[in-house]
Image (cartoon, helix red, strand yellow):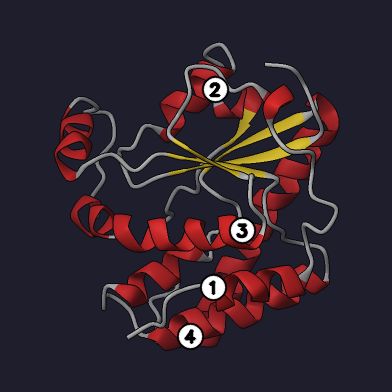
Amino acid sequence: MENELVIDAVEGPSAAGKTTWCRTQLGGQTAAEGFVAEYQPTGREPDGTDLDVQASYWATVNSKRWSQAEELESRTGIALCDSDPLKLHYSWCLAAVGAAPRERFEYELEAVETAFTRLELGLADLTVISIPSPKQLRLQREGDPSRRRRHFELHAALAEPLTHWYSAVDRVDPGRLLWGFPTLLDLSRCPPPRSDRSDPGLLRAMINELPPLP
């Protein structure tokens, strides 16, 4: 994999194989050595009773992961991120399937737009995404006993809205989405880094491409 200055988000439902694929691309390196790890719950996350507090919490968490990606990119030329540092899709997908109020997404969108304005968050240059069938997801979950995946069924149900989200990203800025995990990512055939990663207008254009929430 040739080095370019690029931030690459690796996405898909729980058990899609994101972490395994990141390690494969980097010769088996752990997250501490070569890529930005997926957020691990601490048990102290906001419970949603105060949507403003919840939105601020996740914007801070995701901004820290974005900062890690920028540091890794500057040091090695490429930052693979095990799940998108932006992560705004999660609250939108929850709202799309009726698992969370749409107000949660609206609060989080406002917090994210503020983070974009401060250059603390942005859209990845490239997203590699895999959405296996529900049957395949279950097989892959059963094949990895090291992960509990307590919310697996909910996350599997988010596959369809997740597809809508990244399809909207692709419509706004075509060519920066790769469906399926290739055996080896060839960055020489990928688009150059975005010049407008943290442009709130680009984010809003993408949001406007999404189907309406119920």
Which disc number belongs to residue 51?
4
Query: Residue tagged by mark 1?
Result: 209
Q: Are marks 3 and 2 in contact (CB under 8 Å)?
A: no
**Spot occupied by residue 179 in the image (x, y as percentages of width and height):** 46, 39
Tag 2: Cα neighbours inside 10 Å, few (<14), some, or many (≥20)?
Answer: some
Q: Are marks 1 and 3 in contact (CB under 8 Å)?
A: no
Q: Nearer the viewer, mark 1 or mark 3?
A: 1
191 lies above or below 34: below
136 lies above or below 194: above
Q: Would residue 141 be visible to someone looking at this image?
A: yes
**Cα–Cα gap, marks 3 and 2:** 20 Å
> Who comes first in sequence, dot 1 or dot 3?
3
Name which quarter of the figure residue 136 lies in: top left
**Cα–Cα gap, marks 3 and 4:** 16 Å
What amino acid is found at the position of numbered circle 2 in the picture?
A: Thr
**Spot occupied by residue 74 in the image (x, y as percentages of width and height):** 85, 34
Secondary element at tag 4: helix
**Cα–Cα gap, marks 1 and 2:** 36 Å
Which disc number belongs to residue 62?
3
> Who comes first in sequence, dot 3 or dot 2?
2
> Who comes first in sequence, dot 2 or dot 4?
2
Query: Residue tagged by mark 2?
Result: 30
Give the residue at x 56% y 67%: 58
Q: Nearer the viewer, residue 16 or 107?
A: 16
**Cα–Cα gap, marks 1 and 4:** 24 Å
Name which quarter of the figure residue 2 lies in: top right
What amino acid is found at the position of numbered circle 1 in the picture?
A: Glu
Relative placement, left or right, of 208 versus 161 is right
**Cα–Cα gap, marks 2 and 4:** 34 Å
Name which quarter of the figure residue 93 lies in: bottom left
Q: Nearer the viewer, mark 1 or mark 2?
A: 1
**Cα–Cα gap, marks 1 and 3:** 23 Å
